Image (tube, helix red, strand yellow):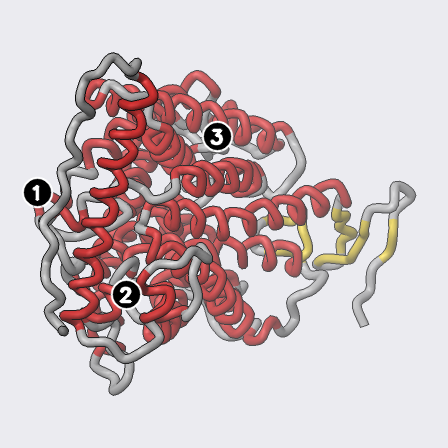
Amino acid sequence: MVEFNYTDSNDIQIMSDGEPLVYNLGNIAWILTSTMLVCLMIPGVGFFYSGLLRRKNALSMIAMSMMVMAVASFEWFFWGFSLSFSEGASRFIGDLKHFGLMHVDMQVSMGGDKLPQLVYCIYQMMFAALTPVIACGAFADRARIGPMLIFVFCWCTIVYNPLACWTWNSNGWSYVMGGLDYAGGTPVHISSGTAALVISLYLGRRRGYGTAELAYRPHNATYVVLGTVFLWIGWFGFNGGSGIGANLRAAQAIMVTHIAACVGGLTWMLWDYRLERKWSIVGFCSGAISGLVAITPASGFVGTPSSLVFGVVGATVCNFATGLKGLLGYDDALDIFAAHAIGGITGNILTALFADNRVTSFDGTDVSDGDGSGWINHHYIQLGYQLADSCSGFGWSFVLTFILLFIIDHIPGCKFRSDERDEVIGMDISQVGEEAYAMPHYNHLEAHQPVELETLQHHEMEEKQNISVSNATSQQASFSEATPDIGLPSPPIVMPVQVPNSTA
């Protein structure tokens, strides 16, 4: 039986090491609220990714986000929390004291003495679930779901849990060294972005890479905006809850999070405007995400004016980093490496420059020993700490992700890459068996039947021709409505050449 008492103010009081310890219900309520906000980010990633892809792959990304969340949450319950936050952890990884969440209830959490262990556990579970969802966007358009889910369980165990341990566990080497990572620059963003790069390299390019087939625009910009809204709101709990308390530092973290997102969105949009002379909402959303990623490790350490730098620099660096895939020849369909790995590294470095121990003290933290200090406080070695943390996180995720992909891919029946027929049909029908939109088109009726690849390719060509005819007809109609009848001939409609049916 768990023993505790209530104080006169209805807070929870327990005995810890022979001394009374009080858990403030306001802190518990805020962390539980933040847990729900972070959970909201998971479908947000799904909608964001879905909107950026083609229609035939839209549902698969939303489905992926939910399935990966389930697998990662189970792994966290099974042994993930124990490997990350057990009290007897080494400098690198924890033990199995809390296997299956044994003895996880009213004890003092590893996150601090403000919360019971159970509350901290469920909050951190959302981080553990979100991280692989970000990484698995790299499987878009070309991978089978079954092997991907096996990969997620293994990746959380071998990659994420050690990173979380050495970053946030008070025994971890980066924590002891003095690395500053308030909400997950390395465990969440650098690890997931780097994993996405390795997945892209390992799977190879999508069918049609380098041709007009992949020169598509996002199929649903509304989904992109919706996903961004979920992420933006959820990030308030992601960063604001990481201080493990309802206090001034949490408010400051939310303030800098919002400002960095706003400035990042405007910055990316202006970079795109210089090229296309259009105020792109997709560009704005991409910039907002970049600003949010950059501010994540610094959110509890920097003042509001500094957040402007995180937004501008984060969005600018991520914007130009999207060109790396063309330069290096890998096919990162959703630019996850540019937004998360590069954005996370940028945020870690900027944290060293702008961390201010005055902000660190907003929750009552004793900063007399230099805790939470950066170059603003003349603590110049902090840059070395941040670089060490960033490089180790990048290297760990890169090497272990590749090894996991290689091993799982060579297990019979667990090949990651889908066949060419499935890529032509789309992952919605070939993997999920359902579609995002119930509108008739060729693969709606025929994809469930055995079809030769040549037939599918012919149907694709017919669909493109029909689109051309439809566009030409609408142009004719628009011209007729806008032009008065003065006896002039109507402009001709250019009909595409009909290609004979190759299967006839």
In percent of width and height, residue 322 lies at 20, 39
Q: Which residue is mark 2?
A: 425
Residue type at tag 3: Thr
Residue 484, quarter of picture: top left
The disc placed on residue 392 is none
- Identify the mark nearer the N-term, 2 or 3: 3
Seen in the picture, residue 361 relative to 17 is either above or below; the reply is: above
**Marks 3 and 1 in Cβ contact (< 8 Å):** no
Callout 1: SS: helix
In percent of width and height, residue 288 lies at 40, 31
2 vs 1, front mark: 2
3 vs 1, front mark: 1
The disc placed on residue 257 is 3
**Marks 2 and 3 in Cβ contact (< 8 Å):** no
The foreground one among 366 and 114 is: 114
For residue 156, side relative to residue 86 (left or right) = left
For residue 456, side relative to residue 137 (left or right) = left
